[in-house]
Image (tube, helix red, strand yellow):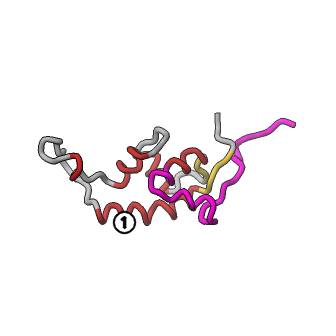
């Protein structure tokens, strides 16, 4: 079932991009190979912004979902996904301060 409400993916990406840039600048991700927990404590382990968002999201999303938002692959993103991502990056205010507009899902057809 589709969420009855959506946000414009472009607006969500505009909030997400600065967070990702800032997060990855503060926490360089591990590229190539893997780091085992025996090599490094959990407290020091740095996750990429994508992984951080996925791990802290209240719904199941994956890196592809985040990439689709950033690339503008779809015009709209379901509200429950957007809300979960915004909560994970502590930007839930974007839904109420005018940065991201909540709209009725244009794919839902209501029968009167």
Give the residue at x 61% y 61%: 100
Residue toward you, 95 or 77: 95
Extreme residue in the right direction = 112
User: Can you give x and y, in whole percent of width and height, for residue 107 in the image?
Assistant: 70, 43
Q: Residue furthest left?
A: 39
The percent coordinates of residue 56 (x first, y second) are: 41, 46
What residue do we see at 49% from left, 50% from top?
85
| 31 on left or right of 20 | left
What residue is rendered at 44% in x and 63% in y? 17
Q: Quadrant of residue 92?
A: bottom right
Q: Quadrant of residue 1?
A: top right
Q: Relative to 106, is 36 on the left or the right?
A: left
Extreme residue in the top direction: 1
Camera-nearest residue between 94 and 2? 94
Image location of residue 35, percent across then percent down: 17, 45
Residue 28: in magenta span: no
Q: Quadrant of the C terminus?
A: top right
Residue under numbered circle 1: 22
Total marks drawn? Answer: 1
Q: Position of residue 105 (x, y in %)?
A: 69, 47
Q: Main secondary structure of the magenta part?
A: loop
Provide the secondary structure element on which disc 1 rests. helix
Measured along the vertical axis of the image, is residue 62 above or below residue 45? above
Q: Which residues are magenta?
A: 85-112
Mark 1 packing: few (<14 Cα in 10 Å), some, or many (20+)? Answer: few
- As for residue 89 lying within the magenta part, the answer is yes
102 versus 99 height, above or below:
above
Left or right side of 83 for 28:
left
């Amino acid at each position: 079932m589709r969420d009855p409400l959506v946000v414009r993916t472009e607006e969500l990406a505009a909030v997400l991009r600065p967070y990702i840039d800032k997060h990855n600048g503060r926490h360089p991700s591990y590229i190539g190979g893997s780091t085992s927990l025996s090599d490094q404590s959990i407290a020091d382990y740095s996750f990429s912004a994508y992984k951080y968002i996925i791990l802290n999201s209240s719904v199941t999303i994956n890196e592809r979902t985040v990439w689709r938002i950033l690339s503008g692959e779809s015009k709209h993103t379901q509200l429950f996904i957007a809300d979960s991502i915004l909560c994970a990056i502590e930007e839930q205010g974007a839904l109420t301060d005018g940065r991201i507009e909540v709209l009725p899902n244009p794919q839902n057809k209501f029968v009167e």
